[in-house]
Image (spheres, rainbow, N blue to C red):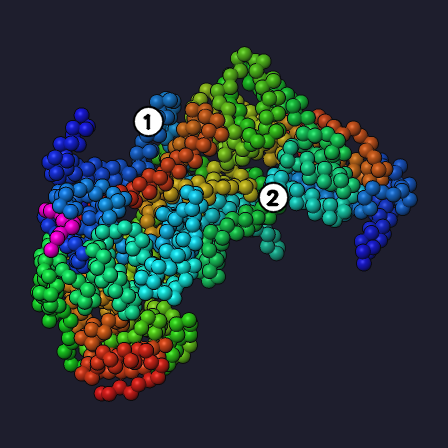
Amino acid sequence: MPEILEAHHISKKYGGVRALKDVTFTAYRGQVNVLVGENGAGKSTLMKILSGSEQPTSGEILLDGEPVQLGSPREAQARGIGIIHQELSLFPNLTIADNLFAGRELRRGGRFVDAAAQRRRAREVLQRLGQDRLAPDTLVGDLPIGQQQLVEIGRALLTDVRVLIMDEPTSALSNHEVDVLFGVMAELRRDDVTVIYISHKLDEFRRIGDWVTVFRDGGLVAHESMSRTDTGWIVRQMVGRDPDSLYARNSAPVGDVLLDVRGLTVPGPVQVDDVSLTVRAGEVVGIYGLMGAGRTELVETLMGMRRPSAGDVVIRGTHEPKGTVQARMAAGLALVPEDRQRDGLVPTMSVRENILLATLARMTRGGLLNGGTEQRTADGKVGELAIKSPGLGALVTALSGGNQQKVVLARALLTDPVVLLLDEPTRGIDVGAKAQIAALMADLAAQGFGVLFISSELAEVMAMADRVLVMARGRVTAEFTAGSVTEEALVAASASDSVLEATK
Amino acid sequence: MRYLPSRRAFLAVGAASVLALSACGGSDDSSSSSSSGSSAAPAASKLIVIITPSPDNVFFKAEQEAADAQAKKLGYETLVLSHDDDPTKQSQQFDTAISRKAAAIILDNAGADASVTAIQRAKDAQIPTFLIDREINKTGVAVAQIVSNNAQGAGLGGQEFAKLMGGKGEYAELTGKPTDTNAGVRSKGYHGVLDQYPDLKMVAQQSANWDQAEALQKTQTILQAHPNIKGIIAGNDTMALGAYAAVQASNKKDIIVTGFDGSPDVVSSILKKGIKATVLQPASKIAEMAVDQADAYIKNGKADQPEKQSIDCVLVNPDNAGTVKNFAVAGS
Amino acid sequence: MTDTHVAAHRQAAAPPPDAPRHTALARAALLLLRGRTLVVLVLLVIIFSSISSEYLTQSNLILMTKHVAINAILAIGVTFVILTGGIDLSVGSIAGLASMVSGGLLFKGLNVPGGTIFFSVAVVILIGIVVGALVGAVNGLLITRFRVAPFIATLGMLYVARGAAQLHSDGGTYPDLAGTEARGNTGFGFIGVDSILGIPVAVWIMVMVAAAAVLVTTKTPFGKRIFAVGGNERAAVLSGIRVNRIKISVYVISGACAALAGLLLTSELGAAYPDTATTYELNAIAAAVLGGTALSGGRGTIIGTVMGAFVIGFLSDGLVLVGVSTFWQSVVKGAVIVFAVITEQAQQRLQSTLTRRTA
C-alpha cells in the first residue's frame, strides 16, 4: 500500500500546551483515510499542518517520501494538497459557475473571462456531483446549505488535487447528498486521489473509509484498516472506554406531572399547531422531527421567548399565564438552547459569569455581588458537571463545544428548575461529551427533574428517551414509548402530516 | 387657477400700500407713497424674507428682531429663517423665498463665497437681496452690502486695550472660528494697533471658536502657561465672557478682558466693572437700514444707496455703557 | 548572520528555541496594549513637560483634571450605553438642556400662577439632573418600545434636546447665575468653581461618579446584566434578564451623567447658554473608545473610560499650553483616537491568539 503523505513525529505546542504529541500519521495513496477523535483531540491541528496553514513545532512532513516544507496554504496547494473546511467559504451573491472559478477565472485572449467555458466546466462538475438539474447560473445564496457544501467540494475538484482533506463535509448534507458525496469520493479514489476525511458520524464513515486513524488527547492512539474494525472498537479508542455506556438510559421511577401543555398554538413562518404534551417527574421525553417542524419554536414558547396565540401551560399543577421568561423561569422551567453561540453564551464574559448569569440576584450581600458566593456556586457546578476549563475567570469561548454546552446547562440548573428543556443538547459536540450529556440527563431524571429534549438523531432519541414525540409541520404526529419505537416509525411520522396513533 | 396667485398678489400690493400709508405716515420714505397701485413693482408681493445665522447668539437675534420689526412697521409680511451658518440650508431657504415670490431678502449670509450663487438665483428671479453684517466676495449681485466696519471697530478695540494695558505687558488673544472672515479681520485690526507697542507682548493666541465654554477652558490653560499675563483680548463677546469667568476663578482678578460685539451681557458686565470694554456693532441699526433700503427699492425699482456701505462701530466702556441698549448706543 | 541562523534551524528541524520567548513577548505586548491608555497618558505627560515647564506643575495638573472631569462624567454615562451595544449621541444636547433648565430656574425662577418661585441651588441641581434622566428615559423608550435603532433615536434626541434648550430662553443666555440671598438661591458656583482641600469640587464629583460607576459595573447584578446584554442579547433574554429594563436604565444613567456634566460646565461659566456642550458627545464617545470600550458592546471598563478622558483632556490642554494652532489640535486629537482603535484591534487579535494557544 503506497503511502503518499506522511507526518513524522509531529509535535505542536501552543504556548505551554501541547496540541499534538509526537504524532506519526500516514495517508495511503488512492485511499479514503478517515480521522476520528473527540473535539480537541488534535485532528484539526494536524490537518492545518498538512495543509500549510500551521507550522509544526517539531517533526517533518514527507510527500512521496520526500521531506517538504509547507509554509502556507498556497505552497500546499501547489503540491496538490487541497482542503475543504467545515465552514463554507462561498460568495452567496455570485453564481455557482462564478464561485467555482473565483480567483482562477478561465480566460479568453488572456484578459477576458470566458464565461461560456466556465459554465461548460461548471456543468461537468455539477454532473459529477450528481446535480445535473442544477443550472450553473444559479446564485449560491439561493441554494440549500447541503448543495452549497457540494459547490464547495466542486471547487476542490476543479483543481488538480492529489490529496484532498475534508473536514466534516457531511454535517449539513441530507442523506441523498451524502450518498452523492460518497459516490464522488469513490470516484476520486479510482482516479488515484488520496482523501483524508474527518468525521464524527460513525455510521457514515464506515461505509466509505479504507483506513481509520483515531486521535485522543493530542496523540494518535490507533491506526487500522477499516475492515478490521467495528463501531464499538472505534468508540472505545475515541473515548477510552466501552461504548455501551455512551447513551445512558434513564431508569428512574416516573412521578407526578410537572409540565402539562394543552393546545399550544404559535403563529409564524414556522408555526406550532395545537400541541399538547406532558412531562412527569423522573421522565425523559424526546421530541424528534426534521428541521422546521416547529420543535425549537415549541420550547422557546414554553420558555416565554415567543407569544402563543392559544393554549395553556401548567407547571407543577399551577397555571402560568404571564408567559414571560422571568415568570416561566420562576415557575420552574429552564431552557438549554439549540444554538449555544447565538442564544446561550455571552462570548465576552468569563466561564463564571456565564454560569451565574441567570441567578446573579442570589449572589449578593447588601446589594453587591459577593465574590466568595459567586466563586463557590460556580465552582460547585463546574465540579458537579465536570466542566473542563482553564479557570473560572477564562473567557467562555476558550472552552470546547461540549464544555460550553455544560456551562449553559449549569446556568439552567442554577435557576432551580423542575423541568429542563434541552434543544439539541448534543449537536456539534464530540462523542465523549455526548455521552456525558446523556448521562447527565439520565442523572437529572433520577433526581426527580422532568427532562424534555429535542433531537434530530434517531439513535440518540431512541436510546435516551422514555417517550418520543414526533413533530411535523408544527403538530405532534406520533407518540411512542421506549419499548415500541422503531427507526422506521419515527422517520415515517416525521415526514407525515397526519396524526398517527401510537402503539403503546 | 393659474392666475389666482398673481391676482391675489395684486390685491396684496394694494393692501400693503394702504397699510404702509396708514402705519408709517411719519417715516422718512413717505415720498414714495405715490407709487401705491400705479407703478409696476419689480416683485408683486409684500413678503420680506429675513435670513440670519442662528439666533442663539444675541447679536443675530438682535439684528433679526430689528429687521423683523422694521419690516412689519413698514407694512410687510415677514418670514424669518435661520441658516445656522450652513450654506446648503441657506440655499434651500433662498429657494423657499423664490417660490414664495418674496419682495426682498434681508440676509446675514453663511459664507462669503458660498452664498453668491443663491443670491444670484434670487436676482434672476427678480428678488433683490440686501446683505447685512457680512459681505460676500462679489459685487453687483446683491443690491446692498451693509456691514459694520470690523476693521475700524477692531482698531478701536485695540486702542482701548492698549490704553488699559498701559502700553506694556503680556497678553493673550482669543480668536474666533478660523473659517469666519470676521475672525481674521478683527484679529488683524487688533494687531494693527497692538503691534505698534514694542512692550506689548502677545504670549498666546488660541481660537475658541466663538464659544464661551471653550474660551473658559482655554483661558485657564493659557493662564497656567503664562502666569504673568495682564490682559486678554477676545474676538467676540461670548469668548470675552468665558475668559472673564476663567479670570474670576483664578487668583489674578485684575486681568483686563475686552470683547467685541456689544452684547447686553458684556455691557452689563462693563457696568459692574468686570469686562473692561467691547466694540459695539450697530446690528439693529444695520438691519433697519437694510429694510428701509429694501422698502425704497421695492417702491422705486432701484437702489437709493451705493451697494457697499460700511457702518462704523462704537467703543463701549464704562463711560457710555449705561446708554447701550439692544446693540445700539444712544445718540450714535 | 540571519541566514546562517535560519539555516541552522532548518538542519536541526528542532523546535525553534525562541518559541516560548515569542509567547512571553506576546504576553508582554498584550500587557502593554491592555494598559495602552495609561502608556499614552504617561507619554503625553513626558512629551509636554519636556516642552513646557508649566505642564507638570501641581496647579496645571489640577486644572487639567478639572477640565477632564466634565468629559469624564459624560463619557462614564456613555460607557454604560455602549456596554449594552447601544450609542448615545444626545449627551451634549442633554447637557445643554439641563444647563438651560437649571440656569433658567436660577436666573428667572419658575413662573407659577400668582408669582415666581425660586428654588435653592440643591433643588435646582436635582431638577437639572432629573431632566437629563427623563430625556434619557425617552431615548430608552424609543429604543426598546418603538425599536428605533439607538444611533437614530439619540441622533434625533440630539436635535430635539438642543432645540428645546434654545427654545427655553428663545436663544438667549442666562448671564448671571449667582442668585441672591433674598431668593435663597446663592451658591451655584460651588460645584464648578470652588475647591475642597485644594481639589476642585468638580474633580471630587468626577471621582464619586467614577467610583459609583465602577461599583455598579463590577459589583452589582445590574452591572453584570449590562455586560450580558451587550455581549449577547438573546442569551441575556434566555437568562431571564429584563433586557428592555436594562437598556432604558443605561440611557437614564447616561442622561443623568450628561446633565450633571452640563451643570458643572454652567456653574464654572456662571452663565447658561443654549449651545453649552455642543459636540461634546463625540469627545465622550472618543474617551470611551480610547479606554477600550468596544462599540459592539459587552466589553469595556469605567476605569478605561476615565483614562481615555484623561488622555483627551491632557492632550488638548497640552496642545493649548504649548501654543499649537487649532487646526493641528484637531489633527492630533483625531489621529490619537484612530491610533487607539488600531491598538484595540491589535489587542483583540493578540488576546484571541493567546487564548487559542492556551485553550
Assess disc 1: are there few (<14), some (14-19) or many (≥20) residues with their C-alpha within 10 Å of its C-alpha. Answer: few
Of residue B226 and residue A129, the one placed in the foreground of this image is: A129
Q: Residue at x 81, y 33 (%)?
A: B303
Q: Residue at x 65, y 23 (%)?
A: B151
**Viewer-nearest of discs 2 and 1:** 1
User: In the image, what residue type sits under mark 1?
Assistant: Ile
Q: Are marks 2 and 1 on the same chain?
A: yes
Outermost residue to the top: B198
Name the residue tied to disc 1: C46
Q: Is residue B122 visible?
A: yes
Chain under disc 2: C
- Residue C110 numbered mark, or none: none
Assess disc 2: are there few (<14), some (14-19) or many (≥20) residues with their C-alpha within 10 Å of its C-alpha. Answer: many
Q: Is residue B330 above or below residue A51?
A: above
Is the magenta region chiefly helix, strand or loop? strand
Q: Is residue A9 magenta?
A: yes
Q: Is residue B237 left or right of residue A46?
A: right
Quarter of the image where one finds residue A15:
top left
Q: Is residue B206 left or right of residue A216?
A: right
Q: Secondary structure at mark 2?
A: loop
Residue range in magenta is: A1-12
Q: Is residue C253 magenta?
A: no
Q: Is residue A230 left or right of residue A181?
A: left
Q: Residue at x 45, y 49 (%)?
A: C88
Q: Position of residue A373 (x, y in %)?
A: 20, 58
- Residue C171 numbered mark, or none: 2
Q: Position of residue C168 (x, y in %)?
A: 58, 48
Quarter of the image where one finds residue A14:
top left
Q: Secondary structure at mark 1?
A: helix
